[in-house]
């Protein structure tokens, strides 16, 4: 699940790990000027080997292998060695750096990206980008979002793999059976938050057919739920802030912005889906069901799931009719845009060859493989034209009007999920505070007004080392 944000457990595991690589990074060679010849100093005709490290399931593994085959046909003097690393990726990536054997190129979590730049681990590819007649085009990528996620002080250290974004998935058969108008993929028709809660309540029923608010409603014996919003995933959690016009991390100050009145309101609204409205199972109840949100949607145990766009890659297999829609709005229409990046390491001995591979990964061929399966959304503007959509919108994969998520929702209302230097370490304070809110031990105001200043102090400390 390439585009998917890493889980909280992964964040805490990798917290501070890049420190181990700083010593090596300090000795890494400065980014060379593009020589225009793969491998730079390699003799003419000599085959250059570069490594490419990344995670991903079976589909992405196969996609990378297919891309390597095509690339090597186009670039016979470059051989790409695929280092498939589906588990403990960041730890293994940094271990290779610390051992003096960094991968030439690789996937980079957005949570790590700016920290790795600070620590000198990633190659500055700005000159390559500016000289490239395709990628250097002003309108090649969705802007300003692409530059915002990739650059520091105007310098490029990676290229986004794609975009992914949270939105609604729903069981269209349930909506038809209940005679309820489903939500839309058109952002101009986004539901209000109150209507979203009202519909979720209509679909939430206990074993006796009672709804939340009815006399005798039994929260311990719920037969079907209205909604599940995966707040354990950061990309999906921060979307709840976006729809209340809050950027969870301020890109000007590089600090959390969740303890503002609007931020507190958004978090409490999310918690109240469980605690007050009783239309969403708490995490313990959800785990106790022993089913994924996809299985619950398919069997009618769940009407709506708020998940990442990447989930379409497996939700498309549902036997029930799948529908998708934009998120509801609290005070504005919005969603998060996020994905991993592709970068070359500063320790690569073959920066020109590494660039050629990065460039290939940013061309339509590579991105189209995963857009067609539902795993990715495009980051390239040409893929969102009428002709471009025909190359990846796939019958049996993308629900009716899904193209509006890519062509209208993201460019007009998408906000990049910005994850600053020190973010993984700061979550060691943020996550326990959020957990206390989800179970009702503390209100959002009680928890966040204490935790956010502490988390911001950690960000200040980490960023002072830049």
Image: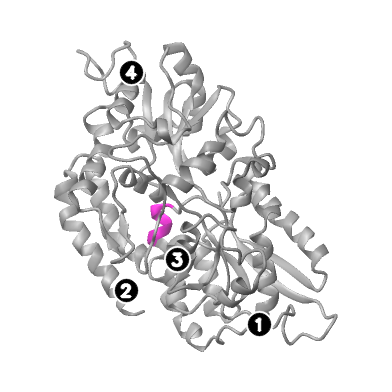
Mark 1 touches mark 3? (CB < 8 Å) = no
Q: Earlier in the sequence, mark 4 or mark 3?
A: 3
Label 4 sits on a secondary structure element that is helix
Q: Residue at x 37, y 65 (%)?
A: 420
Say which quadrant the C terminus sits in. bottom left
Question: Where does the image place residue 218, in percent across and percent down from the top left?
Answer: 26, 18
> Where 452 falls versus 244 (above or below)?
below
The correct choice, above or below, for 232 with respect to 278 in the image is below
The answer to which image quadrant residue 115 occupies is bottom left
Asked if the residue at tag 1 contacts the one at tag 2, i.e. Cβ–Cβ closer than 8 Å, the answer is no
The residue lying at 67 percent from left, 58 percent from top is: 363
Residue 372 at x, y percent in the picture? 66, 42
Q: Is residue 256 magenta?
A: no
Report the magenta residues as a range: 7-12
Residue for badge 1: 349
Disc 4 and disc 3: Cα gap in Å? Answer: 41 Å
Which element type, helix, strand or loop, lies under badge 1? Answer: loop
């Amino acid at each position: 699940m390439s585009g998917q944000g890493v889980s909280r457990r992964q964040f805490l595991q990798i917290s501070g790990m890049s420190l181990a690589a700083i010593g090596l990074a300090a000795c890494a060679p400065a980014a060379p000027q593009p020589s225009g010849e793969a491998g730079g100093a390699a003799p003419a005709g000599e085959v250059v080997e570069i490594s490419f490290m990344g995670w991903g399931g079976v589909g992405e593994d196969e996609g990378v292998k297919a891309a390597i085959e095509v690339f090597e046909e186009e670039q016979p003097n470059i051989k790409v060695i695929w280092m498939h690393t589906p588990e403990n990726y960041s730890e293994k990536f940094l271990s290779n750096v610390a051992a003096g054997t960094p991968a030439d190129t690789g996937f980079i979590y957005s949570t790590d990206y700016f920290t790795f730049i600070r620590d000198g681990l990633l190659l500055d590819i700005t000159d390559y980008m500016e000289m490239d007649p395709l990628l250097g085009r002003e309108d090649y990528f969705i802007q300003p979002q692409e530059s915002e996620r990739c650059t520091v002080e105007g310098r490029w250290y990676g290229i986004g793999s794609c975009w992914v974004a949270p939105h609604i998935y729903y069981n269209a058969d349930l909506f038809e059976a209940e005679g309820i108008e489903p939500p839309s993929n058109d952002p101009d028709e986004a539901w209000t938050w109150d209507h979203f809660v009202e519909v979720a309540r209509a679909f939430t029923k206990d074993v006796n057919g009672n709804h939340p608010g009815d006399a005798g409603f039994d929260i311990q014996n719920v037969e079907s739920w209205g909604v599940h919003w995966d707040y354990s995933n950061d990309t999906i959690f921060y979307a709840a802030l976006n729809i209340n016009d809050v950027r969870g991390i301020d890109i000007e100050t590089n600090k959390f912005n969740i303890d503002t009145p609007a931020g507190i309101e958004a978090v409490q609204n999310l918690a109240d889906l469980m605690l007050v409205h009783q239309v969403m199972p708490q995490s313990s109840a959800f785990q106790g069901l022993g089913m994924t949100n996809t299985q619950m949607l398919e069997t009618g145990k769940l009407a709506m799931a708020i998940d990442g766009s990447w989930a379409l890659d497996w939700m498309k297999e549902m036997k029930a009719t799948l529908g998708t829609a934009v998120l509801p709005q609290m005070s504005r229409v919005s969603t998060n845009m996020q994905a991993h990046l592709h970068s070359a390491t500063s320790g690569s001995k073959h920066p020109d060859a590494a660039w050629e591979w990065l460039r290939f990964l940013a061309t339509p061929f590579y991105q189209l493989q995963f857009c067609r399966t539902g795993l990715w959304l495009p980051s390239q503007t040409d893929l969102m034209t009428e002709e471009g959509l025909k190359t990846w919108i796939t019958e049996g994969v993308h629900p009716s009007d899904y193209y509006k998520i890519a062509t209208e929702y993201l460019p007009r209302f998408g906000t990049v999920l910005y994850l600053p230097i020190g973010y993984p370490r700061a979550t060691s304070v943020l996550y326990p505070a959020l957990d206390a809110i989800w179970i009702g031990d503390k209100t959002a105001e009680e928890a966040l007004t204490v935790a956010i200043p502490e988390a911001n102090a950690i960000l200040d400390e980490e960023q002072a080392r830049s």
